[in-house]
Amino acid sequence: MVCKKCEKKLTGVAAPDKWKEGSKNTKVGSEGRKLNQNKLLSKSAKIRFNPYESKCKICKQKVHQQQAHYCQQCAYKRGICAMCGKQVLDTTSYKQSAK
């Protein structure tokens, strides 16, 4: 569960910009992307998301969502946002199991 404010922080589409003249994809050389660049050594490879780095604040389980502090199970069970912890849903009248 994610609140509306944190929904904007979620990543978008894999290739959001279209292939057209003047876009970021078409510039080659000193202006844009490098030719024959090794993608494993590039800057984007170093800032990749590491799922083993962040853990849930409640159950200490690994969190698989970027910038999230709570796992999906704990966030749903408590009715809170997984990213900021803000109350999203009132779960007082729900019968939820602890599975």
Image (cartoon, rainbow, N blue to C red):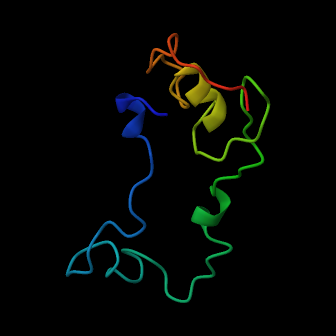
46 in relation to 97, above or below: below
Image quadrant occupied by the C terminus? top right
Q: Position of residue 66 (x, y in %)?
A: 58, 45
State how many labels appear.
0
Residue displayed at 61% across by 24% down: 96
For residue 77, side relative to residue 99 (left or right)? left
Residue displayed at 46% across by 14% down: 90
Residue displayed at 46% across by 33% down: 2
28 in relation to 73, above or below: below
- Residue 71: tell me if it is visible: no
Residue displayed at 31% across by 82% down: 26
Check the image and name the residue furthest to the bottom. 36
Check the image and name the residue furthest to the top. 92
For residue 21, side relative to residue 36 (left or right)? left
Check the image and name the residue furthest to the left. 21
Q: Quadrant of residue 44?
A: bottom right
For residue 18, side relative to residue 89 (left or right)? left
- Residue 17: tell me if it is visible: yes
Q: Quadrant of residue 36?
A: bottom right
Nearest to the observer: residue 55 or residue 71: 71
Q: Quadrant of residue 45?
A: bottom right
Nearest to the observer: residue 88 or residue 32: 88
90 in relation to 67, above or below: above
Q: Position of residue 20 (x, y in %)?
A: 21, 80
